[in-house]
Amino acid sequence: WTPFRLPAFLLGVLFAAKRTRMRRMNTDTDQDTTLYYAQIVDKYSFRLFVFWVFAAAFSLAFEESKPVRLFSEFFLLYPAAYVIFGLTIAGRESRTYRLLTHPLLLLGGKISYAAYLLQFPVWTYIDRMAYGTFGNRFPPCSRDDPEAAESWSECFSKSGYQEWPD
């Protein structure tokens, strides 16, 4: 729901403004600042990762896991944003940054993103092949014809269109 996403957006705006201000004042290239953020990132990124693994396991184990999702989305929003912000400053000084930019992890990300993009057309095609719904997905209906149905739902029902089975 959109209003609940507003705090995440505003937090991103605030961190972007802080990052821009640091870059303008050249405080992001200072060695002490870089090491400070590298320590913070390494300390909190592991804790966040452990919590997210347990939250995912809890969500899979129990049907009603809304409290875990709410905790993850709202209360861990600031620490996660701070880790991402710290990664932009710490760079190679952070072990987390070096882990996330490892070539094998980057390759896995590219492959999984490609699979994510291709899954919908592939599953849609397989579904239509299995149920034979290529021909009657969009039946011919004319709004200008006086004999035509009054609504799209009537048009679909008169054409023999059938819903996909659940």
Image (tube, helix red, strand yellow):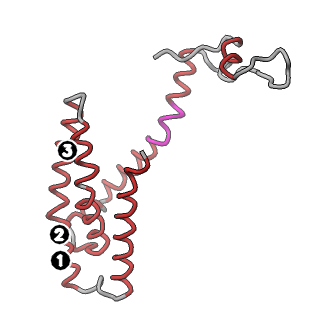
Does residue 121 show up magenta in the picture? yes
Along the viewing direction, whichever of 37 and 144 lies nearer the viewer = 144
Which residue does the numbered mark 3 point to in the structure image? Answer: 53
Q: Label 2 sits on what residue type?
A: Ile
Mark 1 or mark 3, earlier in chain: 1
- Classify mark 1: helix, strand or loop: helix
Q: Tags 1 and 2 in contact by the CB under 8 Å rule? A: yes
Within 10 angstroms of label 2, few (less than 14), some, or many (20 or more) residues? some
Picture coordinates of residue 123, whole percent (x, y): 49, 28
Q: Residue at x 49, y 42 (%)?
A: 117
Q: Main secondary structure of the magenta part?
A: helix
Along the viewing direction, whichever of 48 and 142 lies nearer the viewer = 142
Q: Tags 1 and 3 in contact by the CB under 8 Å rule? A: no
Q: Label 1 vs label 3: CA separation?
A: 26 Å
* Magenta region, residue range: 116-122
Q: Label 1 vs label 2: CA separation?
A: 6 Å
Q: Residue at x 35, y 58 (%)?
A: 7
Q: Label 3 sits on what residue type?
A: Val
Within 10 angstroms of label 1, few (less than 14), some, or many (20 or more) residues? some
**Image quadrant assignment for residue 112:** top left
Q: Residue at x 26, y 42 (%)?
A: 69
Relative side of 160 to 18, left or right: right
Which residue does the numbered mark 1 point to in the structure image? Answer: 36
Which residue does the numbered mark 2 point to in the structure image? Answer: 40
Picture coordinates of residue 84, whole percent (x, y): 29, 64
